[in-house]
Amino acid sequence: MMSIGDAARGSGLTALFIRRPVMAFVLNTLIAVAGLAAFWGVEIRELPDVDRPVITVNTTFEGAAAETVDRELTDAIEGAVARVSGVKSISSTSSFGQSRVTIEFNDGVDLNVAASDVRDTVSRITNQLPETADAPRIVKADANSDPVMRLAVTSDTMSVQDMTVLVQDRIEDELAAVPGVADVQVSGDRDKIFRIDVDQNKLASQGFTVADLRTALASVAFDSPAGSITTTNQDLIVRTTADVTTPEEFENIVIGGATRIRDVATVTLGPDIGQTSLRSDGKTGIGLGII
């Protein structure tokens, strides 16, 4: 019969651990520590992470036709971001009042660094973009990505315009700052805008045209919401930049001579028509999509 001493003198890992019990204890301890570290530190996913390294540049150009957006916005942004290191492909979409440039990077590119490079590159061509266009918005995700979570903001007491202000000033920024959130898509929002309903007959009797009205508005420094001039056959976007904050002050603007806007048109302040509408549990509200 083989004794313990004979087994200890044998070969192999078993014999080694018998001869050196301290080493066996240390190795087992290290294995246990590594297991605990993996348990708490390794990410657990139902599906593998297959997100593409994509950055989207969104720009709003109110009232501009798709051809104008493509020529004055999209082309300039595409040419700028093409020089960023690591770019794999660039695609773009130009629609009425909207430009979207999607940049896909090579695998292994740090998306945070790439986003910073894109932001710096776009900022250098800002002076080449139309003055009336909004500042380009950089999003670290594909604009076509589906939200992983959808939220709805509703109220029994607040109007959609007031909820829009709440979402834009507080909720949207708070959600966008959450780690892991690439973008927050807002739908159903309604900004307050000035609307000018022009009486064509009165305007013509005073010897003016809609173009004269638009010139009068452009010559005044405003700091008020953008609106539109609505006539029977056209709808002109008004971008305002001075201290006119009420319809009455708007109506007092002089078109020419002694003629003021109130003599040929009616000005109202109300919700924008918008492109989307949302209802949740039978209530009109504002939707938030988390990407």
Image (tube, helix red, strand yellow):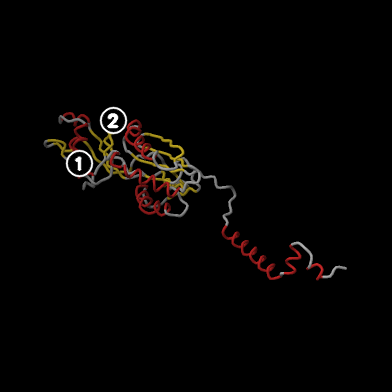
In-front residue for pair 281/194 = 194
Describe the element under mark 1 as helix, strand or loop: helix
Who comes first in sequence, dot 2 or dot 1? 2
Residue 66 in picture, x, y percent from top left: 35, 32
Q: Residues within 10 Å of mark 1 (few under 14, many from 20)?
A: many
- Can you tell which of label 2 and label 1 is closer to the viewer? 2
- Callout count: 2
Residue 151 in picture, x, y percent from top left: 46, 49
Give the farthest residue toward the right: 1
Describe the element under mark 2 as helix, strand or loop: loop
In-front residue for pair 59/273 = 59
Screen quadrant of the N terminus:
bottom right
Residue 124 in picture, x, y percent from top left: 32, 43
* Residue at the (41%, 35%) spot, across then down: 93
Residue 26, disc: none
* Residue at the (46%, 51%) spot, across then down: 181
Residue 73 in picture, x, y percent from top left: 34, 36
* Residue at the (11%, 37%) spot, across then down: 258
In-front residue for pair 100/90 = 90
Q: Amino acid at mark 1?
A: Glu
Compared to residue 166, the image places residue 217 above or below, namely above
Q: Amino acid at mark 2?
A: Gln
Which residue, given by chain and number where applicable, does mark 1 sit on? 251
Give the farthest residue toward the left: 257
| Quadrant assignment, res 241 | top left
C-alpha gap between disc 2 and disc 1: 20 Å
Image-based side of 10 in relation to 101, left or right: right
Which residue, given by chain and number where applicable, does mark 2 sit on? 234
Q: Residues within 10 Å of mark 2 (few under 14, many from 20)?
A: few
| Quadrant assignment, res 199 | top left
Image-based side of 268 in relation to 9, left or right: left
